[in-house]
Image (cartoon, coloured by chain):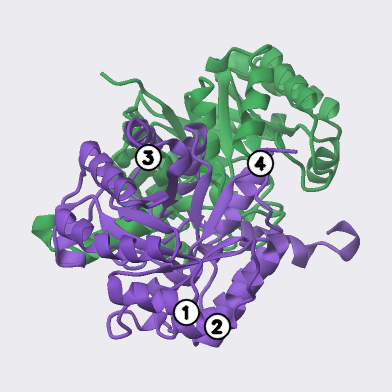
Chain colours: A green, B purple
Amino acid sequence: MSEAVRLVEVGARDGLQNEARTLAPSVRAELIGRLVEAGLRHIEAGAFVSPRWVPQMAGTDEVLARLPKRPDLTYSVLVPNERGMSAALAAGADEVAVFTAASETFNRRNINCSIAESLARFEPVLAQAREHGVPVRGYVSCVLGCPYDGAVPVAQVVRTASALARLGCHEISLGDTIGAGVPSAVKTLLAACVTDIPVQRLAVHFHDTRGMAVANCLTALEQGVRVFDSSVSGLGGCPYSPGATGNVASEELVYLFEGLGLDTGVDLDRLVAAGGFVDQHLGRVTQSRVARARRADNTTKNPEER
Amino acid sequence: MSEAVRLVEVGARDGLQNEARTLAPSVRAELIGRLVEAGLRHIEAGAFVSPRWVPQMAGTDEVLARLPKRPDLTYSVLVPNERGMSAALAAGADEVAVFTAASETFNRRNINCSIAESLARFEPVLAQAREHGVPVRGYVSCVLGCPYDGAVPVAQVVRTASALARLGCHEISLGDTIGAGVPSAVKTLLAACVTDIPVQRLAVHFHDTRGMAVANCLTALEQGVRVFDSSVSGLGGCPYSPGATGNVASEELVYLFEGLGLDTGVDLDRLVAAGGFVDQHLGRVTQSRVARARRADNTTKNPEER
């Protein structure tokens, strides 16, 4: 048996919340169902945030209610505070995620508080989760750059990630929110993080804004990371660079990892089809090059050659 | 001083010959002039092939005649045979390139001869080049897969590349024509090639058909390769997967290498502008994510923040 990597599919949350068109809960549930059919097991299903601020995530409870439940599936939802946490518990989420940034300016402008304040806000959320036996994932954004400050000191990322780990997050996802990082920076960052946090508890979350995401994932893999956030069809854009590319496409990571002989558990054709489904609903063109190549191959080759 | 890598800009040849619209020689010369302004020093300027087969390359002699000549610039042209070689010499090309494939089926269907026959055809071309003191670059295509045969044995790639080196090609560019390769395959391939050819004589030529090109370049870099073919704005498609992505974008490689602390000599803003120029003439959207992000940044940020 080959070694396995775990993909955390974030298309239905991080992806969709950065797309202009809002999809009905039934469509989002159908997308997630197709992702499950494709073999994904860890899926971010939505967020319990104010629909006034993030209309794309309205009805996350309905999405969860419509999903197939199985012991091998983990549906994660983002919660900003205790109120969101209560909603997530009521809706039966398997995991919740909290988020902060390694940049003070970003936090200030994005969630209107300092890093320390955001961590303090999570304490009761984590307590609630512990009480109900729900695991919590922690996101740290801006780990390789901030849209306002530019460079972000590595020590600040480590401090923030470690604080989330100490608060009880079982997994810390390090996010290059603006897709500015290159492999050498990824290596430096991870080397610093693993001095404080076991690599088994780290995930990486790359955006492909500058086409570096696949190379950055490769470097993270070489540094021992085995959990990768990605988004079917490359759903999502970059709110800080309108028109730029968003999350790394799940299709690319499946192609990469399977090519390297690692087991993702994902059926690439079904994944491409799930991406086609959501793209059609959004009226968008796929950002996945694997998806494009696969469709071209299926169009040009006769059935016997497929 | 930081270590340098050399980009071989192939957009004006490999790129343009795979775009539907044909550009006038004056426009191609203007593009190349802008690439020179951006800092590129090794540029594929065209091909002396039949305009009946490749109308996009018609008037390559006019392109060369219009270009700024400087001792630090190398304009390379593709030649399929002695006739093309004579035309290249008459036009004053600084370098010529010959091409074959590591796949028998591909050669048979693409240039209608076996690998051995294609190499035999190059002998008089190489002799002519030697006589005139013109260096010859050798392309081997299908090094990580063939659109007809699928897998291509590594030994066959090594044999073909070595034969070109023995014939007198100063540099061998290994091309993943269908963009099927992953980093582990690149590593295996290069490890095999360097047993026969010094790594200083190897270049890599990746297509981004499945989004692996930047990661593959990173791996080649780690294996000691310092010469990389790329195409401004990701010009060119994949004739074997219509609608799929073509050559890796030069912008991505400049961003990667400069980010890694390597010197490319290229000004990224000027490169992005050169890509915008040719995209406008082709009526196409850039395939470079760096270019997209850079334009978005320049649109959203006020001048002081740029």
Label 3 secondary element: loop
**Mark 2 or mark 4: whose residue is earlier in sequence:** 2
Comes first in the chain, label 1 or label 2: 2
Q: Amino acid at mark 3?
A: Val
Quadrant where the C terminus of chain B is found in the figure: bottom right
Write down the residue under mark 2. Answer: B65
Q: Residue at x 23, y 50 (%)?
A: B102
**Disc 2 and disc 4 on one polypeptide chain:** yes
Disc 2 secondary structure class: helix
- Crowdedness near tag 2: few (<14), some (14–19) or many (≥20) residues, C-alpha within 10 Å: some
Residue B182 tag number: 3
Residue furthest to the right: B304
First in sequence: mark 4 vs mark 1: 1
**Mark 1, chain letter?**
B
Disc 4, SS: loop
Q: Which residue is mark 1?
A: B91
- Are marks 1 and 2 in one subunit? yes
Amino acid type shown at disc 4: Leu
